[in-house]
Image (tube, coloured by chain):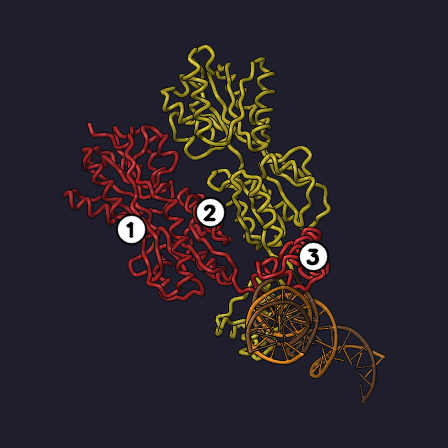
Chain colours: A yellow, B red, C orange, D brown
Amino acid sequence: MTVGIKDVARVAGVSPATVSRVLGNGVVSDTLRAQVEAAVRETGYRPNLSARRLRSRHSQTIGLIVADIRNPFFTAVSRAVEDAAYRAGLRVILCNTDENPEKEAMYLRLMEEERVTGVIFAPTRRTVEQMAETSRSFPTVLIDRACQRSREDTVVLDNAAAAGVLVEHLYDRGYRRIAGLFGNASTTGIERHDGYRAAMARLGLPPAAVFIPPAAEAAEAELRRRTVDAGEALRRPEAIIASNGLLLMGVVRAAGETGLAIPGDLAVAGFDNERWTELVGPGITVIEQPVEAIGRAAMEMLLDRIDTPDAPVRKLVLNGRCIVRGSTAKRT
Amino acid sequence: MTVGIKDVARVAGVSPATVSRVLGNGVVSDTLRAQVEAAVRETGYRPNLSARRLRSRHSQTIGLIVADIRNPFFTAVSRAVEDAAYRAGLRVILCNTDENPEKEAMYLRLMEEERVTGVIFAPTRRTVEQMAETSRSFPTVLIDRACQRSREDTVVLDNAAAAGVLVEHLYDRGYRRIAGLFGNASTTGIERHDGYRAAMARLGLPPAAVFIPPAAEAAEAELRRRTVDAGEALRRPEAIIASNGLLLMGVVRAAGETGLAIPGDLAVAGFDNERWTELVGPGITVIEQPVEAIGRAAMEMLLDRIDTPDAPVRKLVLNGRCIVRGSTAKRT
DNA sequence: CCCGGGTATGAAAACGTTTTCATGATGACA
DNA sequence: TGTCATCATGAAAACGTTTTCATACCCGGG
């Protein structure tokens, strides 16, 4: 039925071993090589990757486990990872966890069963803490999220510094009552909150932060509670920082719906330079993450780790870039 | 080294066959089943999926080949496909072709080597035409793009109708000089252009359409050429239709940069209800595609096709929904 | 008490490769 | 000319499963 290496061998008049050597650049005489190549074309042979992986004992495959591919940050990173993997001759298995620790566990198990050579992983807070205890059969590089005592290679943003930059930028522009909305599912929310808090303290301002689920709706509800419902204009924030693209979108939408002008009634700044932030209203001031660099670096680290499993753990911290737009114009 | 089914069998005091039966819900007595399950836990056994796929001769895997996962349309569809596949116990291999026919060919070859049970594919114009001639070892469902004489199951939008709706909507709102920007890489551009052209003819208006590469930059350049550089206001379009999210973004950005007010100087409408279209300026009028339905339907069709390979070919045509926003307000 | 027919189990073959090992040919060198 | 590497090739084992086939067992009916 389906043509295998034996059929090719028969057609070429050689042994299966020789065909295998031609396919996998072993040493074969030119004459036989030509015969085999002709036979491959003639038979329309396609190697069976499952068999190949089983026998050769390496899968040439890595796993990429992220929260949700619909998040532009993860799509961009995943493209960078895939392109790098492709160049290295590796296949990528992409998994969406929806920030659900059970799905994370399930996919980690799947990675073992696929015998992947490595995994790039953006874990939830809960899972990142458990990772030290359980052991895995493959090297892992954490991206975007990690904690101090993670025993894996990581590549993350300098979240605290970036949040500080936003706070100071708002301060420079004349804003004082600066509120913060932070996601509660990942470590990035915590770190960005830390940076926010530290910067506010440095400037002698009282912090006003809240942790919410990473969804636009949550941000919308929270903003409504803080502004419209709050009533007294004095207590309202003059500016607000959102710790990721989703929350930022919620803030902007809520502002539009409740008739708050940006930045007249409320200055807005956030994380993730998504394409809409450039287009909406006066443009939204954001911290741009070096998404390509993150993906590339993660892949590089993983390859290094595969080469030298016992090298010391590396943590790469990249800096974000603050893109100033109209949403944080000087306070009048 | 790594624990296999034989090790489990030894620990459980049974034969490998029995272990296999326990794992794959064959018939096993309760006592032995319990012993095996204990042994599995004790040894930390993880099945080897390559071996399983090789022997059982089905990969439980489908391919999903799209142009670029960074395009929100494809991310949304791919999530829907993945979720449906996951429910059906199938794994998904995701591939980005960047609208490059060579990459398409390469990934189709890869799919054969992976012995996938089926593929969901959004092909370029060039490839869709060649598909009739070459044969593949797996059933294929085309999404988003297809042509009349495609011999595969397809699920697409009623592109011509949707474009007609936009034209008529603009006409109703008082616009007459309605230009069109269409992507030149996929069949959707052609079909949307056809619909545009037909609607313009029906209304007795002269069409003014152009095909450009599917990139925001191309749309930007084109719009500049048509408006700023054109000079004479009389020849400028009053409204413009963009045939996908990327082009639409280019138009909006160019309008912003050249100081054209939307819709005062230029009404704008397009395809793909991306999140930013709701937020930017007065909101952009768009055709929303039923992305979830497309993904789910494609998966369903593929499963049906796998079950009954000889059933007649099905073509599912879904309708878009026109979401009217401020960018096409009544002409003053 | 014997026979037929299900049923649970194990032994061994098979899946399509890569890899190891043996072998025969070739050539260099003494 | 004989010996010893070196080399290209083929035979066969191995990878970790599932599946087929045979077998031993149990039970009911004659």
Are tags 3 and 2 found on a single chain? Answer: yes
> Do callouts 3 and 1 mark residues in contact (Cβ within 8 Å)?
no
Residue A53 appears anywhere in the view: no
- Residue B180, image x, y percentages: 26, 42
In the image, residue B119 sits, relative to residue B203, either above or below, namely below
Distance Cα–Cα, label 1 vs label 2:
31 Å
- Residue A261, image x, y percentages: 38, 19
Are tags 3 and 1 found on a single chain? Answer: yes
**Residue B3 bears which disc, if any?**
3
Q: Which residue is mark 2?
A: B83
Q: Secondary structure at mark 1?
A: helix
Q: Residue at x 56, y 14 (%)?
A: A206
Q: Which numbered disc flags the more N-terminal residue, 3 or 1?
A: 3
> Do callouts 1 and 2 mark residues in contact (Cβ within 8 Å)?
no
Of the two numbered discs 3 and 1 in the rendering, the one whose residue sits closer to the viewer: 3
Distance Cα–Cα, label 3 vs label 2:
31 Å
Q: Chain of mark 3?
A: B
Q: Residue furthest left?
A: B204
Of residues C24 and D27, the one nearer the viewer is D27
Q: Residue at x 60, y 46 (%)?
A: A108
Judged left or right of residue D21, residue B95 is: left
Q: Which numbered disc flags the more N-terminal residue, 1 or 2?
A: 2
Q: Secondary structure at mark 3?
A: loop
In the image, residue A162 sits, relative to residue A58, either above or below, namely above
Q: Which residue is mark 1?
A: B190
Q: Secondary structure at mark 2?
A: helix
Q: Chain of mark 2?
A: B
In the image, residue B156 sits, relative to residue B152, either above or below, namely above
Q: Residue at x 50, y 54 (%)?
A: B90
